[in-house]
Image (cartoon, helix red, strand yellow):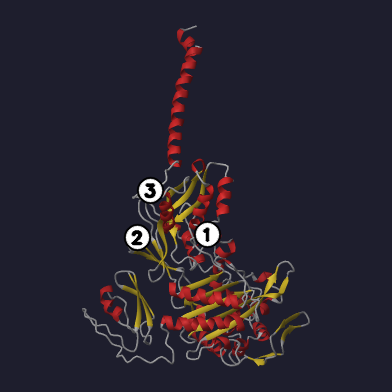
Amino acid sequence: MSQSTMDKTDPKQIKRRFLVIAFILGGIAFYVLIKYFAAMLNPPGADFIAPPRDTMERGAILDRNGRTLAIQTRMGNITVWRPNIEDIEELTTDLSPLLEISAGEIRKNIEGSASDFLYLKKQVELSVIQRIQSLRTQGKLAGISIEPVLGRNYPHKNLAAQIIGFTKSDNEGGAGIEYSFESELAPRDGKNGNQVILTIDTNVQYILEDIAARSMEENKAEAAMLMAMDPRTGDILGSAILPGFDLNDISASTEISRMDRTAIWDYEPGSTFKVFSIAALMDSNSIEPDTYFVCNGEYTRGDRITIKCMGNHGNVNAEDIIVYSCNAGAAYASERMGTASFAAALENFGFGRRTGAGTPGETPGLFRPINQWSERSKPTIAMGQEVNVTALQMLQAATAIANDGVLMPPRIVSRIKSDDGKTIREWKPGEPRRILSEETARNMQRYMKAGTEDLGIGRFARIKDIPIGVKTGTAQMYDPKTRTYSETDYIASCIALVPAENPSLVLYMVLIKPMGNYYFGSRTAAPAIRETAEKLIDYLGILRERNPQESHSGQIIIPAEDILTIGDTVPDFIGRAKRSLAPLLRRDDLILDIRGEGWVVRQSPAPGTPFRPGITIILELE
């Protein structure tokens, strides 16, 4: 046997090698333990260490006017090292009001932990961190340390909570815009995240949430939705979804309160849907404005199909069906159109498809293919049952009525900006498209306006000095347990055009399971729509009949290379440089919304539109 072979098998040599390796591993372990205990034994009074200065920031979420809805901020995780606790009674008493956790729960968490180290609360706001630091400098809170982290702060707390969404403990989007625009908001490639600008107006949102909360309470409803949209642009100005939650305290929320019902929850709309079914029938010439049907209180076909009506309306035409919400009239009218054509016309409004407004988890609703329809389906769908919609779909469909037949996809995000405020791109969910004739849309505007008159079903939404168009609805909720419609649970709703002709605002209110004195949409949702319209008309500057007319020539001379005048109509801005528009920003008789940089490539309203004080002119520049 060779000498080398003997060395390899020499027990003494093996033992020496083992001792060397053990010594090295022991040294590493000792070093790790020293570092661990140094971190855990952060002495009282130690400063809160901010995250590294080169840490990139998550982009802000802003409303349409630049108000901050979500912003990155320094925060801290509150940790506990049990061996260092001196007086647990004093510690829990001091921490309880700061962390908004009961002293008993804090003690239970500490004593019930399987480890000496535990997190007591994560992502605590800087103001609370500073108060904890103050106590530690006084020699209190022994055993408590602060782990610096970057977190998210939501200045308006509950406002538009389901729309904005929230971030998880790792500062990644967990829901809402925070989640769906994660790729824009998150820092990457050594750069700060981009800013996401919403179409939401914070003031409008406050108004909607206030009215929705009071309406929900007055009508003892389980939940409520109240939305406002500019049909000309598709911009959602506000979207109240209640019950809500505090974005700064996700732990206190529930899955239901976090749900964006306007995009995710689908339901049978009831009679508000008649606006679209009757519009589809008229636009196809299946019925004319002077086509009459006989309502004796119900719709029957043979002895198998019966649809009840809320009254005996006698002879009714399309206008009467809308004004009195006649179920029988809508059902009889549906017989005039072929099933396939009827289904296609309603799908053209966007039912059965996602709107693409920008909210995550949006559902397409339920619009079954015609091979799954029964004999009863067409007349039932015409009155708003056997079809499931989302609130976003209803808003989108209403734009076709408001825009004289042109459907405008809704959007909740208007543009993306870099962290230094430069617009990267506009965000558009889809292009507008004509789905109705101008004549049909204007007839429906007129019918909805008539619905607010003395005998109309929408009279409780009427405003004295500005005509609005309204359609209410009351739908029985389907009970999956009994597989029948509930006799106690309803969805009350109301959709409105403000004003009725040439609308600049669409409102939509939904009350889920109202249990007060009334459950009809006409007595629950319509009054809330009236109050909402009253407040938003003033805030948005929509002209009232009682408002005094401004005495103004309507002309202005721009000190530029050429002269831009605004007379009785909106001029053509296409091709004008941004700098030439600056003087218009000083006018108090119009609202100028300039989007982008460079020269005007698109405008709304179109050139030649009658000019009226308070008009909003949207100019898109590239």
Which image quadrant: the C terminus?
A: bottom left
Q: Secondary structure at mark 3?
A: loop
Q: Residue at x 28, y 73 (%)?
A: 578
* Residue type at numbered disc 2: Asp
- Looking at the image, residue 440 sits to the left or right of residue 184; the answer is right
At 59% across and 75% down in the image, what residue appears? Answer: 217
Q: Position of residue 414 (x, y in %)?
A: 41, 69
Q: Which residue position is annotated with label 2?
A: 419
Question: Residue 431 placed where, x, y %?
Answer: 45, 72
Q: Which mark is residue 47?
A: 3
Real-space CA distance between mark 1 and mark 3, rounded to the nearest whole angstrom: 28 Å
Residue 353's label in the rendered image is none
**61 or 130, nearer to the observer:** 130
Question: What mark, if any, has residue 250 been given in the picture?
Answer: 1
Please state which of residues 541 and 372 is positioned toward the viewer in this rendering: 541
Q: Residues within 10 Å of mark 1 (few under 14, many from 20)?
A: few
Question: Image height check: is 160 above or below 383?
Answer: above
Q: Could you tell me how far apart the alpha carbons at marks 3 and 2 are, in whole angstroms?
A: 30 Å
Tell me if residue 408 can be seen: no
* Vertical comparison of 99 with 242: above or below: above
Looking at the image, is mark 1 or mark 3 earlier in the sequence?
3
Q: Which of the two labelled residues, at mark 1 and mark 2, occupies the earlier sequence position?
A: 1
Q: Residue at x 55, y 41 (%)?
A: 115
Percent across and percent down for residue 423 are 34, 65
Q: Is residue 598 left or right of residue 511?
A: left
Mark 2 residue crowding within 10 angstroms, few (<14) / some (14–19) / many (20+): some
Kind of residue sitting beneath label 3: Asp
Q: Residue type at mark 1?
A: Ile
Q: Identify the mark nearer the N-term, 3 or 2.
A: 3
Q: Nearer the viewer, mark 3 or mark 2?
A: 3
